[in-house]
């Protein structure tokens, strides 16, 4: 190998490492945006907004913003019929079901416990990615999975006595459908721009929640300004910014690494709950957050 070839190889390696770092940073940013979700939802409910109205307005707002971005950026947004059908199937059969199952689970079991069951999805993603996306399952991913799940268990650990089985099953269903959404999205993003994809997904989820809300007779706008502001935060921060960063990160670092890094969300949620809602932040929660960060750090290396 010539000196010039060695130098070029070094530059390429450095560029790849920098790109991987960008992917990790995007997913972490997305995770922080998503961690606001639980706090904003509680504030919306306190202000009189129902679950379905909160979800409906959240996704309508997000869809409008994504389509405005497409119009301003003059994106080519038309999708072939086959791609559109695949996006619709994932949006309805995975994303919509994930949101509905999780928010219904909150009715039966503590939200922290529901989130803990939800975070079985990185393991499911890692397994599905091996078979569907042909991503290798390395020792780094295995170690990161163990660390991040252990961290989540420490942060969210609660007694298992008296848990309503309906809430447990709904949370597990959300974990399963969320893993399918992330793996399926990774495949589709090879041929679809992330902004265009986000616009279609949020539009389809918005339509689905509108139909469900009317079908259940739960249309009510009897909520205060606090609830409205919380819904706006959900739409812009926890949906538009979160999805834009998350799916861009997926394109760079893959589905399984993205899912594992996303387990930082419970730690960030605990901190925000302490800062905004005055919820107790214990030493165990802080220790759990450090364990999750250790798992994320493991993934910084080549895997």
Image (spheres, rainbow, N blue to C red):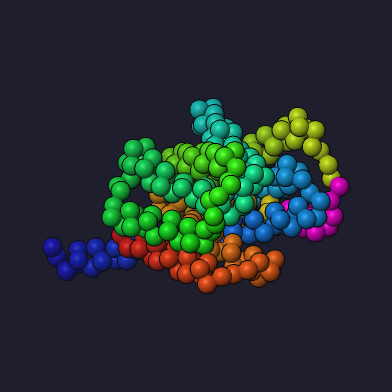
Q: Is residue 97 above or below residue 254?
A: above
Q: Is residue 16 above or below residue 213?
A: below
**Res. 268 visible in picture:** yes
Q: Is 71 on the left-hand or right-hand side of 85?
A: right
Could you tell me which residue is drawn at 44 percent across and 41 percent down? 183
- Residue 278 placement (x, y as % from top left): 69, 69
Is residue 224 within the magenta segment?
Answer: yes
Could you tell me which residue is drawn at 19 percent across and 63 percent down? 5
Q: Is residue 250 above or below residue 79?
A: below
Q: Which is more toward the observer, 237 or 271? A: 271
Quadrant for the C terminus in the image: bottom left
Q: Is 1 on the left-hand or right-hand side of 217?
A: left
Q: Is residue 122 above or below residue 152?
A: above
- Residue 230 placement (x, y as % from top left): 74, 57
Could you tell me which residue is drawn at 59 percent across and 69 percent down? 281
Dominant secondary structure, magenta = helix
**Res. 189 visible in picture:** no
- Segment colored magenta: 222-231
**How many marks can you see?**
0
Name the image quarter holding residue 23.
bottom left
Could you tell me which residue is drawn at 56 percent across and 33 percent down? 93
- Residue 19 placement (x, y as % from top left): 40, 61
């Amino acid at each position: 190998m010539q000196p010039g070839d060695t130098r070029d190889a070094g530059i390429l390696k450095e560029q790849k490492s920098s790109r991987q770092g960008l992917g990790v940073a995007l997913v972490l940013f997305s995770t922080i945006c998503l961690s606001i979700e639980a706090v904003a939802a509680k504030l919306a409910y306190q202000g009189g907004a129902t679950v379905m109205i909160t979800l409906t307005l959240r996704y309508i707002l997000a869809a409008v913003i994504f389509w405005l971005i497409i119009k301003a950026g003059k994106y080519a947004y038309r999708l072939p019929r086959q791609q559109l059908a695949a996006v619709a199937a994932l949006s309805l059969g995975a994303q919509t079901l994930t949101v509905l199952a999780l928010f219904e689970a909150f009715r039966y079991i503590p939200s922290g416990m529901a989130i803990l069951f939800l975070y079985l999805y990185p393991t499911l993603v890692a397994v599905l990615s091996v078979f569907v996306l042909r991503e290798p399952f390395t020792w780094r991913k295995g170690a990161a999975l163990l660390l991040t799940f252990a961290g989540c268990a420490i942060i969210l650990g609660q007694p298992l006595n008296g848990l309503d089985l309906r809430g447990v099953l709904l949370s597990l269903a959300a974990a399963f459908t969320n893993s399918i959404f992330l793996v399926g999205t990774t495949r589709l993003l090879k041929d679809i721009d992330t902004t265009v994809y986000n616009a279609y997904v949020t539009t389809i989820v918005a339509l689905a929640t509108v139909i469900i809300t009317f079908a259940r007779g739960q249309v009510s706008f009897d909520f205060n300004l606090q609830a409205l502001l919380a819904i706006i935060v959900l739409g812009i921060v926890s949906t538009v910014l979160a999805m834009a960063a998350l799916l861009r990160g997926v394109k760079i670092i893959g589905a399984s690494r993205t899912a594992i890094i996303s387990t930082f969300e419970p730690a960030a949620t605990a901190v925000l709950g302490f800062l905004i809602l005055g919820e107790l932040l214990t030493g165990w929660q802080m220790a759990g957050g450090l364990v999750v960060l250790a798992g994320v750090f493991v993934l910084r290396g080549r895997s």
